[in-house]
Image (spheres, rainbow, N blue to C red):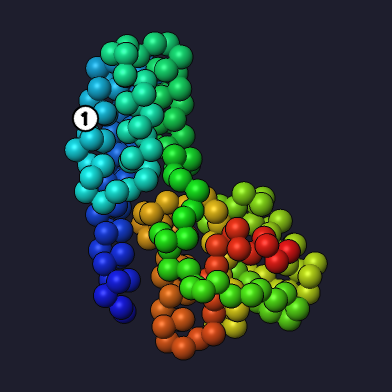
Amino acid sequence: MSNELHNVFNRARIDDRQINELIGISRGLIADGVITKPEAEYLQKWLTANAGVTGNPVINNLLRRINGMLSDNILDADESKELFETLEKFSGGEFELGEILKSSTLPLDKPEPDISFRKTNFCFTGTFAFGARRDCEASDEAKGASAGSLTQKTNYLVVGVYATESWAHSSYGRKIEKAVEMREGGTPIAIVGEVHWTKFL
């Protein structure tokens, strides 16, 4: 494993602990069905303390939102409701606070390869703006490609556009790690982002 990839995985383990702790805090805050100003301030302090450790965009984005809500030193009813709904979705595993995937955050192929569909094999992982994974697979199959699990025969692993820098802690991150290992081992597999893939549809 390259030093760069090793560093990414080490950072991901820190991210993993942060995300798990944030999920626990979120569940505690929403347990009584409402977010109060002191609770929002507590979360703000935790996020501030953790935001600089890894630069995790999930944490940074949530911190920006809370900073905006508390900028007037008031948490009104609408802001409280919005924060509650955000934490409820987050603690349920819906990582909607993540930024749209930036190519620098994942081990995508550089330069980005041309994509051909006829008689090639695709695997899709993550969450896609294009639609459900089955929709992505159907689009490829309509162009003469096959789509399914990640195997030694996979030509392209396509990563959904909604991902964060903490990708390695997630279920889809395991698939990316495996593809990186395959690529480094000489398997002719390309790792591409959704935006690049859609350019060739």
Q: Nearer the viewer, residue 3 or 139?
A: 3
Residue 70: x %, y % from top left: 32, 19
Residue 16: x %, y % from top left: 30, 53
Q: Residues within 10 Å of mark 1 (few under 14, many from 20)?
A: few
Is residue 160 visible to us here?
A: yes
Check the picture and name the quadrant holding the C terminus. Answer: bottom right
- At label 1, the amino acid type is Lys
Instruction: Say which element carries label 1.
Output: helix
Q: Residue at x 23, y 45 (%)?
A: 52
Name the image quarter holding residue 190: bottom right
Residue 188: x %, y % from top left: 54, 85
Q: In the displayed orientation, state which residue is furthest to the front.
A: 111
Residue 181: x %, y % from top left: 41, 79
Give the answer, above or below, for where 62 lies relative to 126: above
Give the answer, above or below, for where 47 lies relative to 68: below
Q: Is residue 64 left or right of residue 120?
A: left
Q: Residue at x 54, y 80 (%)?
A: 189
Say how many tags the image has: 1
Name the image quarter holding residue 199: bottom right
Q: Residue at x 35, y 32 (%)?
A: 64
Q: Residue at x 45, y 22 (%)?
A: 82
Give the answer, above or below, for where 154 lies relative to 81: below
Give the answer, above or below, for where 54 lies relative to 80: below
Residue that badge 1 annotates: 45
